[in-house]
Structure formats: C-alpha cells, structure tokens
Amino acid sequence: MKRCVKMFDKDFLWGGATAANQYEGGWQEGKKGISTADCCTRGSKTEPRKVTYKTKDGNIKADNLFGMEINDDVEFGCFEGYDYPSHRASDFYNHYKEDIALMAEMGFKCYRMSIAWTRIFPNGDEEEPNEEGLKFYDQIFDECLKYGIKPLVTLSHYETPVGLVNKWGSWSDSRTIDCFLRYVKSVGERYKDKVEYWLTFNEINCIDFSGWVAAGIPNQNSQTIADAAKNQLIASAKSVITLHNINPNNKVGNMIGYGIKYPNTCHPNDILKTWEEANEDYFYCDVQARGYYPRYKLKEYERNGVVFSLNDKEKEILKSGTVDFISFSYYMSNCISADPKVAPNQSGNMSFGVKNPYLKASAWGWQIDPKGLRIALNYLYDRYQKPLMVVENGLGAQDEVDENNKIHDTYRIDYLRDHILAMEEAVRIDGVELWGYTSWGCIDLVSASTGEMHKRYGFVYVNYQDDCSGNGERIRKDSFYWYKKVISSQGRDLK
Ligand code: BG6
C-alpha cells in the first residue's frame, strides 16, 4: 500500500514508549527506593494484582489493586513470598545499550520513557538527589542522543515513593507537591542539555479508577481523590513553570488516558450520560490546558459534598502553568448507557462501558477502534487547539516464538497500520496538528493492569515469562521490520 499523499512531516516524532516500573527492573540497584509499583504483585486475566502491606499488629496482607479500600494506618512494602514483576521487569537496567540500539535500528526519532522518582529521591523527601540515579539516566540519554533519538520523559508514570505513602498518604497531602518539585528541578537542571520534551503525570485521569496506581492512595474516597487530583494538578502546573524557567526551549505536555466514549443509543439520556462521563477525562486536561477548574467539576464537588477551594496563588499557578502540548494514550473505545438495565460488559484497564457490536476486541477484551483515534484527535484538537502527541497505542497480545525463533505478529501489524492510517487522515483530511507517535511497550514489558509478561505489545520480544523463567533474550518480531519501513518511509509505506 504505497501512498503518494503527504502524510507526516519530516520532523514527525516516530518512536515507542515504556515506563520505568514496567520495563527497567533493577529495583534495588543504585540505591533506588521502593515505589508504589514495586509493591504490586503479578496477576493474570482472572487473578487481580494485589498491593502488599503490614498491619499495625504485624500481619502481612494483600488487597486488590483496583477497588482497594484501605483506610487503616498500615505500612506498604514488599514482603517475602510474593512475586513482584516490577523488580526485574524487562531488565532494561542491564540491557539498555542493546535495547536503545534496537530502537535506533528501527529508526526511532523519539523514545518516550519515564524516570523512576525513587531512583533520584529514594524515599521521596530527601533534600539532595541520589547521584547514582542521576548517572543512570545520563547514560540512557547519552545513548539515545548518540543515535539521534530524542528522549520524551514522563516525570511520573504510575509510581510514587512508598516512603511518602507511609509518611503522610503521598498525593493526598499537599506536602508531596514540594517533594515532587524538588525532584523535577533536579532532573530538569541535570538534563537540560539532553531532554527537551517532557510529560508531567502519566494518565493523570486514572486517579478516578485507581488512586493507588496514579497517586499512591489506597482508597477511592471522593474527598481523597479530589485532594490528590488538586495536588497533582498544582504540581503539574508548577513543573511546567519550573521546566520553562530552566530552559525556555523545553516543551512540556500533559498526558491523559483517552478512550473515546460513544452513546450506546441515540436516546437523549445516553447522550447526556456520555457527555458526563467524557467530562471525567476532560476535567484533568481542561485544567492543564486551560489553566482553571471547569464549572462542571466544581458543581459536581458541590453536589457530592466534596470540600474544595483554590486560593489566589493556586489559581495563578494553574493559569501560568498550562501545557505546551496535549498527549494521550489511545487503545480502544466504549459505549455508554444511562439505562440501569444495560450492565457494563466491556472494559479496558482504566475504562468501562458497554460492548459495541460494530467492533472486534483483543484477547484481553479491549475493543479495537482505529476510527476512534481519528475522532479522538479531532475532539482534542478542537477543544484545546494545542499540538497533540499520541504517546501510547498498541495491541496487547500473546506472541508465539516458532521453531526458527521467529514471531509472526501480523495481528499487531494490522492493528498498528489501521491506527496509523487513522492518524494520517486526521492530519491530512482534518488538519490536526500532530507532533508524534510513540507506540506502547515498543520492547516487551510488564502489563500495568495485570502484571503479566505474556501480554506483549512490543516490536521486540523479551524472553521473560510469568513464572519468572527466561533468559531475557531480545528477538525481533515481524512487526519490527514493518515499523522500521513505516518510519523510513515517513508513514507512507504501511504494507
Ligand atoms: C496505559 C498505561 O494505561 O496502558 C501503561 O499508561 C499501560 O502503563 C498501558 O501499560 C497498557 O495497559 P496494560 O494494562 O495492558 O499494561
């Protein structure tokens, strides 16, 4: 399928994305501290991931990662007898040269990765950064730059120092803002000549689904969620201001999980409900892109008895710390019904809804909807008129290595091709301003929702298995060669 139309411009940032807690491993190397992700056990499609902790009377317990409701004073941590996949993950810590060389071989222009806050401030509240942690990322960035790959750095991707959780409830307490800013200043200054693209919080709207994953809070109490959201939004705005002060060329974006929501029917009740649910995602983006709390959120807080206020200084911070671009993850779409008789029967990791009869789903039940990506790009561009980046997209699938050590992942190629075509249409036909595309888990990594290794997204297979076996060997999949061709043809050759 050779296409003659102008697709993506030559500066388009083609690449891939990972997150430290799912990919890096080396959880105790270089004086790294323990993060919230390090306390999450491995799960499966049927067995939920759990978070481990010690109660006041010394018992070790584990509660489900999603829907956790711990309100007692407990101590979160890692304990013997549990399997924690983040501890080794894909062992990028020891494989980074090989992995970045593979990214370079595919022609990556950009590599989205996250810094583990606990490598730089192991407990979260230290006065000085950990030099060993800083050196580790120096090596990563130098290796990327050697190949002309621009790092796109997420400051917080689903991990908070457990030290801050045990000390004062992490993001539910506004003291975490200063700790985070100390970290942002340290990495911003240290890497000012190496990193130009930054994201503040990964899928910040995930606080609404899992307070633990996104903000290190062990319950879904609406007051705590509102407090944590406010603290992260202020921290995000302050990070934008800080990074701009350090280097005016810095481009700082936000990041939301964005699954398009369709009304299940044309009944006005479904339309209204869909609008309400979409606002749950837009809320975070509205604040980060526009610089103020939207009226619908303030009214919702009022209705639900959530205590909320912003002083003049906080209002000013939100206003001056708006992002330069909007980034988002896109995997799937959902239908929304207001009818109590229509039960939700379909979900992704952070979105729930009703099955769409027009769509197929992945083996993990995520509905595949490339056209939804074109719609998503248009919705976001119309709403904010800021440049966009798709920083996560991909198919989680079980790959088989054949007797010749090959992986024929045509299903992944099909998924990615259709989504790239949808982006191309959004750019060419609709005129959306799109800066880049970093597909998720470009080298296999641990799944965030299930903790499995065999839910794979990568162009490169990593030989680690869920039973902890495997030698960590990297194997190029068929999609590796395909993506290489896509990038070298600037998205023109998708066959
Ligand atoms: C996004 C997260 O929600 O989806 C990633 O930002 C995550 O961290 C990705 O890995 C895919 O989800 P999962 O649950 O399949 O790993």
Image (tube, rainbow, N blue to C red):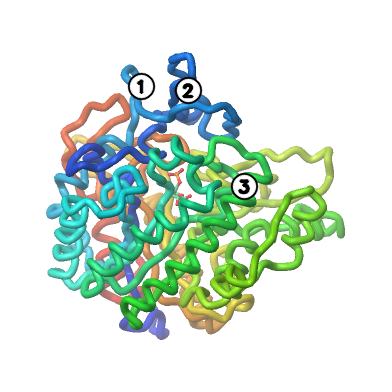
Q: Does residue 1 lie above or below 114 as drawn?
A: below
Q: Position of residue 63 (x, y in %)?
A: 52, 25
Quickly name the residue at label 3.
Answer: 225
Looking at the rendered image, the quarter that the N terminus falls into is bottom left
Quickly name the residue at label 1.
Answer: 82
User: Which residue shows up at 48% across the image and 81% down it?
Assistant: 433
Label 3 and label 2: CA atoms lie apart by 21 Å
Q: Are marks 3 and 2 in contact (CB under 8 Å)?
A: no
Label 2 and label 1: CA atoms lie apart by 10 Å
Quickly name the residue at label 2.
Answer: 62
User: Which residue shows up at 40% across the image and 46% down it?
Assistant: 159
Query: Which corner quadrant of the image does residue 466 belong to?
Result: top left
Q: Is residue 56 left or right of residue 179?
A: right
Label 1 and label 3: CA atoms lie apart by 28 Å
Viewer-nearest of discs 3 and 2: 3
- The secondary structure type at the circle numbered 2 is strand
- The secondary structure type at the circle numbered 3 is helix
Q: Position of residue 141 (x, y in %)?
A: 20, 64
How would you rate the neighbour count of disc 3 (Cα within 10 Å): few for under 14, some for 14-19, many for 20 or more? many
Marked residue nearer the N-terminal end (1 or 3): 1
Q: Are marks 2 and 1 in contact (CB under 8 Å)?
A: yes
Q: Position of residue 315 (x, y in %)?
A: 61, 71
Query: Which corner quadrant of the image does residue 376 belong to?
Result: bottom right
Q: Amino acid at mark 2?
A: Ala
